Image (cartoon, rainbow, N blue to C red):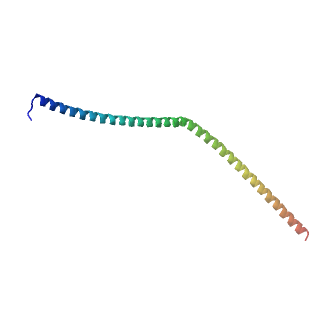
Amino acid sequence: MPWDLETLKTYVDTRLDAIGQRSDDRLSTIQRESDTQARDLTRRFDNVNELRELVNDQAARFITSDAYHAEHDALNSRLDTLTNRVTTIEASATGTARLFGFLVAGIGAIGAIATTIIVLTHH
């Protein structure tokens, strides 16, 4: 086919239209992918913000380490006081039990002596 100005113009216009159509198709594809990625990114940001709110809510309910240590020290002090009381009560109970044991042994010894005396005097 011989090239003249009219055929060359037609050829170039056809090629430019084809390139334009491919560019439009690519641009549409890129725009759709971009919209999809933007929606995905927005959804991810929403999830991250929701997680951030959850963490902030939990952190608001946590006690500080200073408050924990103060309460822990107070509980240890109360535990020491109660331990001392139990030790005192156990020592008192042990002393009372020993006294009761000595009392029972004394009564038993007196009873044995009295029985021996009675047996010896009646024979």
Q: Residue at x 52, y 37 (%)?
A: 58
Decide which of 15, 54 is in the foreground and name it: 15
36 lies left or right of 95: left
Query: Which of the 4 quarters of the picture holds residue 25?
Result: top left
For residue 97, side relative to residue 80 (left or right): right
In the rendered image, residue 31, in percent from the top left (x then y), is placed at: 32, 33
Asked where in the image residue 24 lies, by quadrant, the reply is top left
Q: Position of residue 72 (x, y in %)?
A: 58, 40
Residue at the far left in the pictured view: 2
User: Toward the viewer: 59 or 114?
Assistant: 59
Vertical order, 103 against 118 (above or below): above
Q: In which quadrant of the rendered image does the C terminus lie?
A: bottom right
Determine the residue positioned at 21% across, 34% down. Answer: 18
- Residue 7 is situated, as x and y percent measured from the top left of the image, at 12, 31
Q: Looking at the image, is 60 positioned above or below residue 105? A: above
Q: Residue at x 37, y 34 (%)?
A: 38
Q: Quadrant of the N terminus?
A: top left
Residue 100 at what x, y percent from top left? Answer: 78, 55
User: Which is nearer the eye, 57 or 118?
Assistant: 57
Identity of the residue furthest to the bottom in this view: 123
Q: Residue at x 89, y 66 (%)?
A: 118
